[in-house]
Structures are given as C-alpha cells and as structure tokens.
Image (cartoon, rainbow, N blue to C red):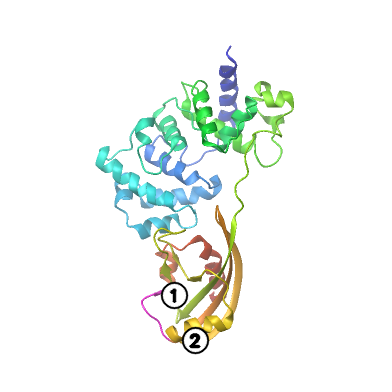
C-alpha cells in the first residue's frame, strides 16, 4: 500500500471519531461554507460560531449579501477584525450575481476569480462543497506537511506554500477531499500544534511521520519571524451630553476604514491640551481621566488612554448610545471603552 494512502486512511478514521459538529460542517451549502472559511481566517473556531450564525440569519443568501448596506455588514462583522474580509465578501457576492447567475462558482479556478478568495479558500470551498480533489493549504497543513516529510523550507514564504500545494495534489484523498482537508487542518490545530510541544503520542499518523521517527518534531517547521509590531500611543476622547456620544467614521484607505470610533488622537495629549482642543468646539463641563488599554493589530499596537468629557453642546457627530450598540460598526479598539461605559452607566 502507498504510504500516503495508508496515512490518509488513518487520518480520515481519526477525523471521523473526533469531528466536531460545527454549523458549517453539517451542510453542503457552498454559500455557508464560503462565509465560514472567510470568518475562520485569523479567528478561532469558538469565536466564529456566534458570528456565523448571526450573519447567516441576517444574510441567508448571496443576493442578500450583495445588496446589504455597508454599515449593516460591518456591524455584523464587528469584533471579528480584518474588516477587508467583509468588504471582499460583498464584492464577491456582486460578482456571483453578475457573472455566475447568482451562484458561487463550482470550480477551484473560477473560485479564485472572486475578490478575497485565495488558493486556500478556493480549495476549501471546492473540496468541501463540490468534492473536488484540491488540497487546502493553510498554516496548520504546512506544519503537518513539514513534519511528516521533514521539509525544512521556510513555511512563511509563498513559494513554500505553492510547493506544498503541488505536492499535496498527489496526496489529497480523491474520494473524500473535503474531509481530508478538514482532517489535515484539525490535525494541525489540535495535535500537530505550533505553539508548545506537538502531541505526537495521540497523533493518528505518527507511524508515518519522518520528523517523529527522527526526533525532529520540535525543530520543524522552519518559519522566519514576522517584523516586530510598531507601537503607537493614542488619546481617546469620549465626548458626551445627555446620553449622546461623539463618533466619526475612519477615513477610507487607513486601518479600520469605514468603522466608527470615538475621537481618536494619534499621540499623547495632556489634560491642558485636551481642554484647548475641545472647549472651543463643544464647551467643557467636566473632564475626567478614564480607563486605558492596549489593542493589538497584526502589524501595530495601540496603547490608548481615554478621557470622558461632558460637553455643553453637540453637533451631527453625536449619536445615541443605542445607535452605537445596535447600528454603527465600531472599531475593535473601542470595544473595551464601550464595555467600561456600560458598566459605569448600568
């Protein structure tokens, strides 16, 4: 028996035993599978479940997604981060409505034409929804491959991903490609882990893993370090009057574009400087130092100090607290401040 055929048999048997009942795994609906795969990028499974269910309830079809207004879309996505994913979903839905007769394309190559759909996502949809034998190569799968085959290529490099994709074309199970891909991803996330010691003692394919046999599992895969995150200091000004709060939409083309936030000054302001900035515009009744917290994005870290400022007058930037809670998509960095205000006013 070919080694990869035997390995696939062991892998799929294991997956059948441990497979989690997730809402996107109990369907062959390509739309739902696509939404789940986009949400699962950079986000833990447990965190995705309520977002997925809320999203599908509100936008159950491609047509609904293509026609949704941006604020509703971003509010549904609020807290998931990487908001370009949501924008690309809507753009891709429009392409499907215009080009593919209101359906997701059903081949790997056509799926690649959709905005926001790369090699991994296209392969995941093609294999899970349409039973095409295409390997879905994410970080988990790269790690499993590197250990099974003692591959010392840098898995952070795009050429390594393409190499592994070509190699796994020969190994993906042709009869059950969707479960094969999900099993590989599950193995990488639960057993052949990257952070901490890999759990080789419970690995279903340890007997055919070259790294395990050679004692190299802790030194693979090779992965170059990411650039260190930049650190930025921000002053957050929470202006309010009679349960109305100042918010504005972030500018197009910058981090968190189209999301709303409280007044956000991208440097440290002293209390006197805050008074000089705000008093001429709105008139200050009271100003108090509020909470501080740090929010981490992929490439930058915001260290934020907030102030709550009661003002005398308001303008069109001020909205009700209900609007902030229910309608406006707020930037993730504002979440902790919103929670603290809710505690204070409850």
Name the quarter where the N terminus is drawn: top right
Tell me which numbered mark, 2 or 1, is placed earlier along the sequence. 1
Tell me residue 276's x, y (percent): 51, 84
Locate residue 3 relative to residue 318 in the image: left or right. Answer: right
Q: Which residue is mark 1?
A: 246
Relative height, residue 310 to residue 161 (above, below): below
Locate residue 40 relative to residue 248 in the image: left or right. Answer: right
Q: Label 1's element?
A: strand
Relative height, residue 127 to residue 195 (above, below): above
Locate residue 157 relative to residue 206 in the image: left or right. Answer: left
The disc at residue 132 is none
The disc at residue 284 is 2
Q: Label 2's element?
A: strand
Q: Which residues are magenta?
A: 313-320
Tell me, yes or no, whether the highlighted magenta stretch contains residue 315: yes
Does the rendering let one see residue 182?
A: no
Residue found at x 53% / y 28%: 164
């Amino acid at each position: 028996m070919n080694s990869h055929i035997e390995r696939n048999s062991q892998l799929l048997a294991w997956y059948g035993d441990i497979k989690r009942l997730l809402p996107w795994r109990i369907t062959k609906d390509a739309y739902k599978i696509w939404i789940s795969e986009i949400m699962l990028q950079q986000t833990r499974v447990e965190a995705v479940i309520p977002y997925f269910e809320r999203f599908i309830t509100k936008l159950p079809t491609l047509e609904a997604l293509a026609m949704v207004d941006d604020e509703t879309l971003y509010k549904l996505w609020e807290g998931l981060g990487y908001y370009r994913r949501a924008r690309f979903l809507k753009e891709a839905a429009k392409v499907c409505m215009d080009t593919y007769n209101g359906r997701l394309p059903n081949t790997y190559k056509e799926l690649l034409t959709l905005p926001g759909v790369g090699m991994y996502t296209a392969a995941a949809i093609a294999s899970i929804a349409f039973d095409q034998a295409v390997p879905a190569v994410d970080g988990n799968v790269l790690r499993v491959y590197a250990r099974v085959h003692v591959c010392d290529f840098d898995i952070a490099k795009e050429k390594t991903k393409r190499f592994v994709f070509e190699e796994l074309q020969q190994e993906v199970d042709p009869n059950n490609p969707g479960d094969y891909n999900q099993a590989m991803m599950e193995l990488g996330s639960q057993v052949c882990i990257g952070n901490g010691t890999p759990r080789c003692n419970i690995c279903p394919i340890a007997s055919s893993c070259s790294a395990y046999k050679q004692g190299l599992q802790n030194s693979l895969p090779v992965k170059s370090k990411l650039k260190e995150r930049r650190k930025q200091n921000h002053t957050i000004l929470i202006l309010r009057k009679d349960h109305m709060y100042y918010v504005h939409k972030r500018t197009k083309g910058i981090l968190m574009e189209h999301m709303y936030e409280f007044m956000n000054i991208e440097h440290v302001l002293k209390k006197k400087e805050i008074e000089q900035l705000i008093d001429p515009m709105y008139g200050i009744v009271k100003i108090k130092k509020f909470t501080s917290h740090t929010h981490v994005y992929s490439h930058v870290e915001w260290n934020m100090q907030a102030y709550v400022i009661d003002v005398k007058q308001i303008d069109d930037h001020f909205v009700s607290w209900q609007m902030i809670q229910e309608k406006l998509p707020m930037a993730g960095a504002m979440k902790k401040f919103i929670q603290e205000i809710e505690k204070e006013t409850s």
